Amino acid sequence: MELLPEGCIANAISFTTPRDACRLSSVSAIFKLAAESDAVWESFLPPDYSTLLSSSSSSSSLRSSSKKELYFSLCHNPILIDEGKKSFSLDKQSGKKCYMISARDLLIIWGDTPTYWSWTSIPEARFVSFTHCFCLFMYYSFLMRKDILAISKNRFPEVAELICVCWLEIRGKINTRSLSPGTLYTAYLVYKLTAGSFGFEYQPVVVSVGLVSGESQTRTVYLEEERGLRQGHHGLLNRSSSQASTPKENDGYFPKERKDEWLEIELGDFFNKEDEDGELEMSVLELACGHWKCGLVIQGIEIRPKLGK
């Protein structure tokens, strides 16, 4: 193998994975040169990476980087695209595309009505004036909250804060052509709950993922982990053993804390076929109970390859 030209070795490595390329770079000096070459790492980047970079104002410093540096920068530092409405990054293990749709790019029912939702700049946290007598109570709840926005990492310049609604409806869409083909994706709502939040204690929300005008995967999840978990177990006590299945913290029905200090809840999976062409829609709904809810802070909906797939 040592007698093979560097270009031949690089061509062979380009058919492996980013992890394999890093391992092969330790074999010998010529393997290191081949494994770190632009030819190898450009093969791990998506075919349209240049178009995505050119559409981002935050990527100018990356264009002079080596392809390996570019790859790992996109893995660890998402860039803003689509006029700042979405973020783009790469899955470190596979090089598959990942996106987050910002709260501003989501359809949030009553999202532009200040009585029900407010838009908060990051890291600046602000309070809103209330015109509804019920929302005066919410004001005191907001005063007691932790200043969670000021200490959290956020990809976008603003987030949506729920003041009070009894009808929760959030939807997001992305074209399947933007995703990596032949890939199983999982969608997540990325959010926080303020210290004064309520209405999510024992009430699950209905989430779904699927193609517009096609079949959707629908299920119920809890946005508040501790109380939701208690409610899940409580509800099982009234069901027969043949019907019941004990919920677990890691089964996707309860939120998990992310490295960026936000929470995420699984909305569902979607396999993007090689020739898929349509719009993928994700939704979070709580329409049935009619209870008032407040204190939900939304950063966006993230779509990334399912772990290990």
Image (spheres, helix red, strand yellow):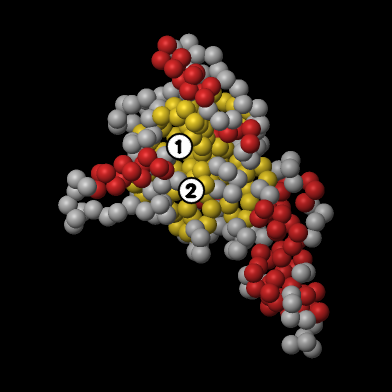
Nearest the eye: 261 or 29: 261
Q: Please name the residue shown 42% across and 43% down the image.
A: 225
The mark closer to the camera, 2 or 1, is 2
Residue 60 in the image: above or below residue 291: below
Q: CA distance from mark 2 to mark 1?
A: 21 Å
Q: Residue 283, percent across and down?
A: 42, 40
SS for callout 2 = strand
Residue 133 in the image: above or below residue 242: above
Where is residue 121, by image quadrant? top right
SS for callout 1 = strand
Looking at the image, can residue 173 be seen? Answer: no
Q: Residue 261, percent across and down?
A: 58, 43
Nearest the eye: 73 or 193: 193
Q: Please name the residue shown 63% across and 48% down the image.
A: 88
Q: Which residue is mark 2?
A: 256
Residue 171 image label: 1
What is the three-letter code of the residue carrying label 2?
A: Lys
Residue furthest front as drawn: 144
